[in-house]
Image (cartoon, rainbow, N blue to C red):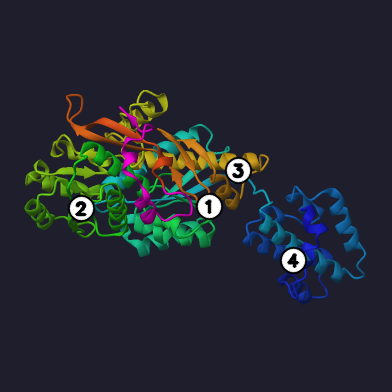
């Protein structure tokens, strides 16, 4: 704050020709008392200051307003009021003081120096699929949020503030989702949003969050484009993106089937399906350029009948069939493919199928390559006996009757990241509750643990998250396939560097990466 006085920045900020507070003072009736005039002036100022989120200033009526800016020392306070006292008329004093307060609010808004009042509760909006075929994925995520928020609140919340969630259904469509998102933020005074599952929704939500200046954690969507095509201040991702997931899948495939010659793809026809295939294809052809792509099939999102696609694949007989589909779409495709014997003639590669293992059960044969969109797995070879993961798995089973799937881990990871970020911001803010901008700033450079491995958030807001893949295998211990021959891929080796575009970066990868000694095999 010293620099604002010494460098004359206040002069630029406090000399508007006609601030609303001045217009108000001119309109005051002559028979009003000076106290009444001050009340009106400060009421006007309070409304202005509250609009930019500085309630600490808005509550002031005297020299105490300066205390809202910790860096403003007492000698500056005395100097300001000496100057005010020297003004000749009362009207000049209230006009000058009004301009000063508005200028200080503007300066502090620019500098981010104001500490916010500690809220009674932390409102968090969460979008997830609660209806439609994707609800088999979204409803467990909601259950995870409820369970983990209850656990966090029981331990004191975040910075001593309890979390109050509001859930929004992504299944209602993009237009209604966006309308509900705005309503929760603007009418519900929500400062943090966890959104979204769908890559298409994330592309829509991100610029809106930036305009609303609400901290938005991309808690599950995979599209790499959302953070590569534009830099955001308030948008953060607490997990990996499609690049990390597709590169690791190609590496596992080539390790498993090094002599691969033909491949086909069957993906959902929307942002994720198209983008993930582009990344997979570019990576595969960079490492093994002689592979032939025999079919690229994109049925509509939410399709219920894949007989046409399955018939074509049976006729083509590719060695490998890739599908990055998820949720109810993936379940339906696998069941129909299994019933018609397609899974006996081609190796299936399903990077998102960890979330479908329990639901598909015997429909999924042995030997299918399955990814976990992170290192998330209830039988994680490194963490399965750790109390944090083990206890959560039991509580989640007790609540839902099912094992947690990767969307569950991503939800918990987003909440753990939010907690770590706010606590970091509080520490940076010398114990004061941070503003939204300060929270967003604190998220960058953050390193924290979810239920499994460590996540790091880069300066561009992208999370670095290791990847786990394995082969399905039926065992007597479970009534659904589990994973064997697990490999964990470090995120820093398979994630596009800051400032580069993934579709082009993956073309630079070399075949030698397949045998990198840092890959952990179990």
- Find numbered disc 3 in the image and state the secondary structure of the residue it sits on: helix
Mark found first going from the N terminus, 3 or 4: 4
Quarter of the image holding residue 111? bottom right
Which numbered disc, 1 or 4, marks the residue closer to the eye? 4
Which numbered disc, 1 or 3, marks the residue closer to the eye? 3
Q: Quadrant of the C terminus?
A: top left
Q: Are marks 1 and 3 in contact (CB under 8 Å)?
A: no
At 28% from the left edge and 31% from the top edge, which residue is drawn?
486
Q: How many marks?
A: 4
- Find numbered disc 1 in the image and state the secondary structure of the residue it sits on: loop
Work out how far the residue at label 1 is from the one at label 3, CA to CA, in angstroms: 14 Å
The picture places residue 198, in percent across and down from the top left corner, at 34, 54
Q: Are marks 2 and 3 in contact (CB under 8 Å)?
A: no
**Mark 4 burial class by Cα count in 10 Å: few <14, some 14-19, many 20+:** some
- Find numbered disc 4 in the image and state the secondary structure of the residue it sits on: helix
Mark found first going from the N terminus, 2 or 1: 1
At 23% from the left edge and 31% from the top edge, which residue is drawn?
482
Quarter of the image holding residue 515? top left
At 28% from the left edge and 55% from the top edge, which residue is drawn?
273
- Find numbered disc 2 in the image and state the secondary structure of the residue it sits on: strand
Q: Which residues are magenta?
A: 496-522
Q: Identify the residue position indicated by label 1 in the image.
A: 191
Work out how far the residue at label 1 is from the one at label 4, CA to CA, in angstroms: 27 Å
Q: Identify the residue position indicated by label 3 in the image.
A: 425
Q: Identify the residue position indicated by label 2 in the image.
A: 265
Q: Identify the residue position indicated by label 4 in the image.
A: 13
Which numbered disc, 2 or 3, marks the residue closer to the eye? 2
**Mark 2 burial class by Cα count in 10 Å: few <14, some 14-19, many 20+:** many
Can you say whether 74 is above or below 4 in the image? above
């Amino acid at each position: 704050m010293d620099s604002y006085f010494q460098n004359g920045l206040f002069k630029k900020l406090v000399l508007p020709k006609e601030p609303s507070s001045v217009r108000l003072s001119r309109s005051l009736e002559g028979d009003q008392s000076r106290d009444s005039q001050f009340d009106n002036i400060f009421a006007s100022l309070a409304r202005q200051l509250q609009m930019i989120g500085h309630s600490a200033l808005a509550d002031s009526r005297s020299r105490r307003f300066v205390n809202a800016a910790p860096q403003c020392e007492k000698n500056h306070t005395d100097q300001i009021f000496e100057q005010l006292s020297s003004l000749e008329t009362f009207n000049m004093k209230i006009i000058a003081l009004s301009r000063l307060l508005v200028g200080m609010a503007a300066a502090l808004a620019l500098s981010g120096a104001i500490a916010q009042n500690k809220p009674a509760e932390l409102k968090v909006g969460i979008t997830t699929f609660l209806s439609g075929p994707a609800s088999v994925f979204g409803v467990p995520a909601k259950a995870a949020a409820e369970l983990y928020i209850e656990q966090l609140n029981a331990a004191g919340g975040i910075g001593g503030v309890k979390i109050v969630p509001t859930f929004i259904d992504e299944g209602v469509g993009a237009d209604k989702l966006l309308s509900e998102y705005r309503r929760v933020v603007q009418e519900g005074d929500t400062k943090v949003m966890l959104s979204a599952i769908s890559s298409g929704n994330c592309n829509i939500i991100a610029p809106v969050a930036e305009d609303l200046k609400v901290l938005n954690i991309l808690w599950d969507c995979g599209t790499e484009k959302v953070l590569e095509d534009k830099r955001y201040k308030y948008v953060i991702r607490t997990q990996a993106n499609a690049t990390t997931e597709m590169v690791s899948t190609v590496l596992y495939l080539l390790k498993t089937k090094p002599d691969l010659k033909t491949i086909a793809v069957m993906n959902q026809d929307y942002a994720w399906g198209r983008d993930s295939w582009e990344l997979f294809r570019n990576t595969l052809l960079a490492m093994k350029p002689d592979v032939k792509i025999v079919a690229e099939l994109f049925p509509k999102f939410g399709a219920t009948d894949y007989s046409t696609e399955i018939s074509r694949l049976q006729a083509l007989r590719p060695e490998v069939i890739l599908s990055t589909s998820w949720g109810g779409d993936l379940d339906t495709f696998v069941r129909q493919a299994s019933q018609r014997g397609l899974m006996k003639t081609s190796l299936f590669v399903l990077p998102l199928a960890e979330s479908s293992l329990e639901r598909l059960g015997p429909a999924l044969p042995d030997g299918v390559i399955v990814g976990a969109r992170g290192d998330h797995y209830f039988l994680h070879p490194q963490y399965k006996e750790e109390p944090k993961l083990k206890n959560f798995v039991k509580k989640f089973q007790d609540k839902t009757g099912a094992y947690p799937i990767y969307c569950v881990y991503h939800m918990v990871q987003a909440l753990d990241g939010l907690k770590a970020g706010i606590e970091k911001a509080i520490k940076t803010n010398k114990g004061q509750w941070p503003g939204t901008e300060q929270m967003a700033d604190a998220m960058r450079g953050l390193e924290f643990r979810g239920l499994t491995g460590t996540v790091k958030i880069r300066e561009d807001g992208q999370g670095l998250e290791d990847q786990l893949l394995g082969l399905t295998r039926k065992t007597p211990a479970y009534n659904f396939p589990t994973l064997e021959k697990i490999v964990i891929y470090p995120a820093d080796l398979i994630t596009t560097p800051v400032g580069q575009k993934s579709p082009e970066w993956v073309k630079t990868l070399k075949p030698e990466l397949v045998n990198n000694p840092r890959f952990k095999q179990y």
